[in-house]
Amino acid sequence: MNASTTNFSPITALSPLDGRYAAKLALLRPIMSEHGYMQRRVQVEVSWFIALSDAGFAEFKPLTTGARAYLLGLVKNFSEADSTAIKEIEKTTNHDVKAVEYWIKSKFEARPELEKAAEFVHFACTSEDINNTSHALQLRSGRDQVLLPGLDRIVLKLREMAHLYAAVPMLSRTHGQTASPTTVGKELANVLVRLQTAAERIASVKILAKMNGAVGNYNAHLAAWPGFDWEAFSKSVVETPEPVGLGLTFQPYSIQIEPHDYMAELFDAVARANTILIDLSRDIWGYVSLGYFKQRLKAGEIGSSTMPHKVNPIDFENAEGNLGLANALLRHLSEKLPISRWQRDLTDSTVLRNIGVAMGYATLAYVSLLTGLNKLELNEAALAEDLDGAWEVLAEPIQTVMRRYGVPGAYEKLKEVTRGQSVTREALHGLIASLEIPQAEKDRLLAMTPGSYTGMAVALARRV
């Protein structure tokens, strides 16, 4: 097949985000695509233009109610056809922001009020005044409408499982070896609390934007109106809530570009949440391997082309892989974007075009992980069998009670009986019977089993 004649479709897409996984990213695509970027550029230009009309300049009278509604409609009703029209203009301008400006002006035709004020579109702005604010709007929407809801769904599922399995005992493994028992619910609660904290940090990052001209000093603005408070005006446009303003946080100091430190903070916060989920994905994968969890079957699904019995933990493997891809991009973004040579270089521009890719891999991973969690069924028999074969874990409570009552060499005595050996219930009971401790304590220890030795695990799991 001639590559030049291949039509774009999900099966010819270079990225799996727009190919194999396209349907799973339907919520993110309108926000983080170039079309989403174009729409937000129009939004910024319109907000700036309307605000200029209200600034009190004799040369630009306040717009009528009808004109304002029309302009806001350009943003609200912005379509893929509009994006395509802007791209057509860009073929001539070879400048994407200028193409947006010309497209807006083209929408003023046959509207005398707007035609008269056309030169106030993009007035005193540098391209980055439009770009940084547009990226900020994209990031805020992507975070609030897609990433955080995705994490919230996982948090809700983990809470449901933590409560459901709060009292189901499970053998712990530290360093891969048997250790003090816990409960399934408590182990899920551990992840839940970590993930909640990580999500709160993502949500708390202030999304910044600047509108201060070519090198951040309002040079052109003051050349036009020297006595006007341009900084206060710019802050008002940036911070006034939508749809009139942008509803962002004002960045007062910058070079030509906004410093991107908030982006680094946001991407690092998302990467931290993703790392927690990589940890969870690997642990669940391991529990499936141990037989602690079974996976509900899906009709027609095949686990192996040669081994018919297999039900693979593919959702957790997909989540782990895509979280790794997301973090590789997020970490590069957070390390690169705050660096710019002198007052501006273009290395950030091409990198910023990939923020949707980073968020796409994260979003895809959240979908896979939640799908996997929803398929899990607990195998309590396997959990109980492992616990019944690990009586050595009761060496800890026995020696701790011995210490309470001053029995000399408690740790050493238990170490001699248990370390590296197969420990039976009978052997431990024989040791307990020989101890010089109160009979009530002996009875309490004799009643203890690996499955009952879970400390506060049940209460901790139910508390989240």
Image (tube, helix red, strand yellow):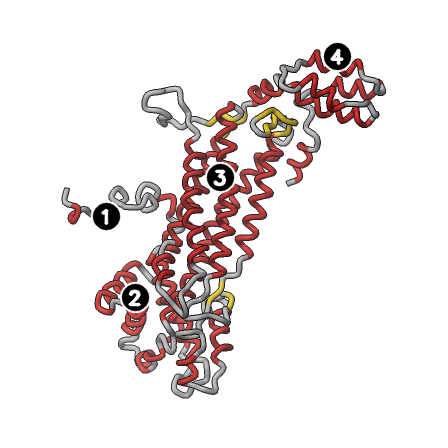
In the picture, the disc for residue 78 is: none
78 is higher (above) or lower (below) than 393: below
Q: Nearer the viewer, residue 80 or 167?
A: 167
x%, y% of residue 195?
56, 44
Nearer to us of marks 3 and 1 is 3
Q: Gap between marks 3 and 1, in whole Å?
A: 33 Å
x%, y% of residue 345?
36, 65
Number of residues whose C-alpha sits closer than 10 Å to that of mark 1, classed few (under 14), some (14–19) or many (20 or more):
few
Identify residue for label 1.
8
Q: Name which residue lies at 44% across and 51% down.
A: 330
The first of marks 3 and 1 along the sequence is 1
x%, y% of residue 215?
41, 74
Q: Gap between marks 3 and 2, in whole Å?
A: 38 Å
The first of marks 4 and 1 along the sequence is 1
Q: Is residue 412 visible?
A: yes
Number of residues whose C-alpha sits closer than 10 Å to that of mark 2, classed few (under 14), some (14–19) or many (20 or more):
some
Q: Quadrant of residue 368?
A: top left
Assign a secondary structure to mark 3: helix
Q: Is residue 240 visible?
A: no
Identify residue for label 2.
96
